[in-house]
Image (spheres, helix red, strand yellow):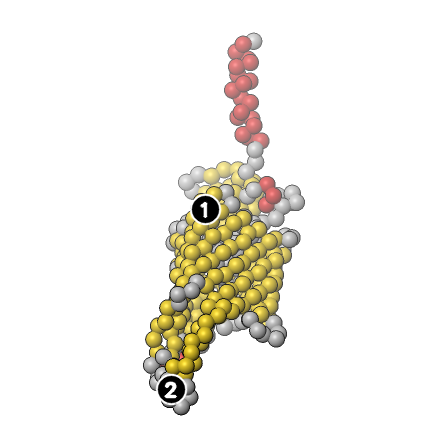
Amino acid sequence: MKKLIVLILILLPCLAIAQDSTFVRVELKQGSPVEGVLKNQNDKSISLEIPGTGLLTIPWESVQAVVRLAKDEIPGQGGRWANPHPNRYFFGPSAIPLKKRDKYYQNAYFLLNSIQIGLNDHLSVGGGVLVPFALFLTPKIGYKVAPKLHLGGGVLFASSLIRDLNFGVGALYGSATYGTNEHNVTLNLGLGAIRENTGMGTSDYRWNFSNKPMLTLSGMTRISNRVMLMTENWIFNVTTVNYDDGTQGFVSRVSNYEGIFSAGVRILGRKSAFDAGFLTPTGAQAAIPYLAYNLRF
């Protein structure tokens, strides 16, 4: 009898483990992701039990990533897929980093194209082009330092593609994001510089660095499987230098804070998303529509 009891005590944990089904999403290098119960994996392949279909074995050379799904993400159990785009709002970043080898593409207004690539789980590099005006770079770093807190930072640098435009903007910023991938707020705080005309009646341009910080305050919250509400708000210092029209002599320097405020929705797919909203610059009499397409791959 003692031996039987000991045997039962040994087998109970094994039975519990066997009944604990692990539901995963297998992201493929080509084609749509596959979701199911993990049945087996070895050095050659991974096997899933697909609900309503049966056992599917996938060779590792076709797999990009395997993601274990939380209970509230499992299809058919009242769950939803995870937010595929917690790393960026309409344009500005959160401190949540891309994962290694993840890629993020965005197109706004059919003219603004950008891409970000995860070099590892903390560092990503990216950039883009505003056709046909400007080229920009956006390296970024981020770490999870507490269950609901990410800290990070990055650089934004933009330069004109048109020689006579003489446009340039740069910013170094730090980021703090509080919340989860589904519901969060982000504060970005940094210092910037702009390449502008000297204002002395010449064609000379130079970099002027701001001694006052710029900031963005953004947030997103998921209200359904497909819909996420978002806001992104930029506040920055603008300095205007006034000169006498006749003598070109200095008259005054005026500095004040202005902003661009936005609100809208993100319509979510498993990897892609569409953004729709409105932008309102300080002092504007009307809002500007905003449209963008996002893809994680």
Per the image, the residue denoted by label 2 is 248
The answer to whether 268 is drawn above or below residue 40 in the figure is below
Q: Secondary structure at mark 2?
A: loop
Labelled disc at residue 80: none
Using the image as rendered, state which of residue 242 and residue 7 is in the foreground: 242
Residue 75 x/y as whole percent: 62, 46
The answer to whether 44 is drawn above or below residue 84 in the figure is above
Labelled disc at residue 144: 1
| Residue at 36% from the left image edge and 71% from the top image edge | 208
The answer to whether 85 is drawn above or below residue 72 in the figure is below
Labels 1 & 2 near each other (Cβ < 8 A) = no
Residue 98 x/y as whole percent: 45, 53
- The alpha-carbon separation of the residues under discs 1 and 2 comes to 53 Å
Give the number of the mark in front: 1 or 2: 2
| Residue at 55% from the left image edge and 18% from the top image edge | 8
Residue 151 x/y as whole percent: 44, 50
Q: Residues within 10 Å of mark 1 (few under 14, many from 20)?
A: some
Q: Amino acid at mark 2?
A: Gln
Q: Secondary structure at mark 1?
A: strand
Q: How many numbered marks does the figure carry?
A: 2
In the picture, residue 261 is in which quadrant?
Answer: bottom right
| Residue at 63% from the left image edge and 57% from the top image edge | 227
